[in-house]
Amino acid sequence: MDGDFEGVLLSPIVLDIFGGDSSGEETIEAYLERCVLSYLSGSNDDDNQAERETVLFLLSVACLNLFAQSNWTGPSISIHIHDFLPATLLRVYSEPQELTAAIVSSLILDGESVYSLVCNPFLLLLVRVLLVNCGHKLESFQLLPWWTLRYVGLHQQLLEERSPQLLALSRSSMDKVMKSEAVLADDAHRNLAIQLHLECGYNCLTYYEYHAAKEHFQKARELSRLDINLTGALGKRTHFQENFLAQLILDVQRKDDMPLPGTPCTPSPTPKEGLPKNHDLDDDTVLNKMNLAEPGKHKLPDLTAEEQAVILAVCTDLQKTNPVHKLTDEEILAFMSVIL
């Protein structure tokens, strides 16, 4: 919960799970799966069994976050595969490149090659073993399919083309997680329900399922209780414009004037001093921003992170489902002005 994902991986209990012996003849994926199943079958007590499943569930979450951190968000991490796996398993790989190539080859699906500069592919392989190969052993976690969907999203981005295997896994995970959507039905968890539909929508876009994506984005929009409308307002765009003319803007209002309930799961806003400075256009003609005749009439509410994400999703849907056109660019600009 504190984001110490490296601490999870290097904890004694996790190191003990994968610290067994190996004949050296099995693949790394097969060894990981054997260790996981052995750990799960090593208890006859129900309470102890639940604890073991929890350990593996948390391990999969930690690995997925670390993989995203090391390849997308940073900062870099100092995890090494030799910290986890026995020397007898790794001795056949005399060079680090051979070990990396063996792990990457396990991530190849449907013949699609994996991005060559991927960092720490071992983490994604371990996630695959935990959530896909051994996922049927962790079904007591109702939102496990949601994390499986997140795995699909990351793995797909490493492949050159869309994988039919990942598409099937994506659809199966979405079906399962929607069946347990009742877990998030409470108004206090509305922000999580919004996140779920947004992630499902983006996953559908990845596989060109535009109709399904639009339905998920619409559901997220309904849960956010936001009125999001492109409308016209009188304004000026240039220094020399004498009369106010109709301008395309995005009007965003809350239907019941009540923000989403704040929870520890909602990211806190970045302090303004930590944000990039606004860069003036320094243009002799165009104003830095639109000068509205009645700026107070379309004042934005103080939007939460989830509400901003909903607006961005509506914009993404508009961009993906409309042809490249100057009018589409103007509509996207109106959305971006609100987000920024």
Image: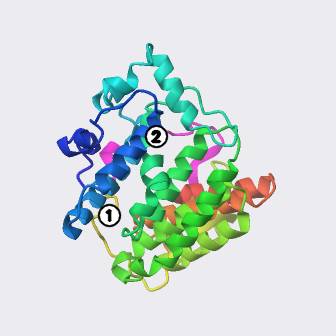
Q: Describe residue 230's horizontal placement relative to residue 155 as left or right.
A: right
Point out residue 70 in the picture as x, y percentages from the top left corner.
Answer: 41, 35
Residue 293 shows up from this direction: no
Which quadrant of the figure has residue 19?
top left
Q: Secondary structure at mark 1?
A: loop
In-front residue for pair 38/114: 38
> In the rendered structure, does residue 340 fall within the stretch colored magenta?
no
Say if residue 187 shows up in the picture.
Answer: yes
Task: Identify which residue, 182 or 31, lies in the foreground.
Answer: 31
Mark 2 or mark 1, earlier in chain = 2
Find residue 192 and report its image quarter.
bottom left
Say above or below: 273 vs 134. Answer: above
Badge nearest the viewer, 2 or 1 = 2
Compared with 263, 239 (above or below) is: above
Residue at image point 72% right, 64% down: 210
53 sits to left or right of 180 = left
For the N terminus, the quadrant is bottom left
Image disc number at residue 265: 1
Q: Residue at x 53, y 69 (%)?
A: 197
Up/down of 188 relative to 97, above or below: below
- The magenta stretch spans which residues? 270-290
Q: Is residue 279 magenta?
A: yes
Q: Specify few, some or many for label 1: CA neighbours under 10 Å numbering under 14, 14-19, or 20 or more.
A: few
Q: In this image, 110 relative to 126: left or right?
A: right
What kind of element bears circle 2? helix
**Residue type at the position of mark 2:** Ala
Residue 141: percent from left, percent from top: 37, 68
Q: Which circle marks residue 30 in the picture?
A: 2
Q: Nearer the viewer, residue 50 or 332?
A: 50
| Quadrant housing residue 170 | bottom right
As displayed, is residue 170 above or below residue 117? below
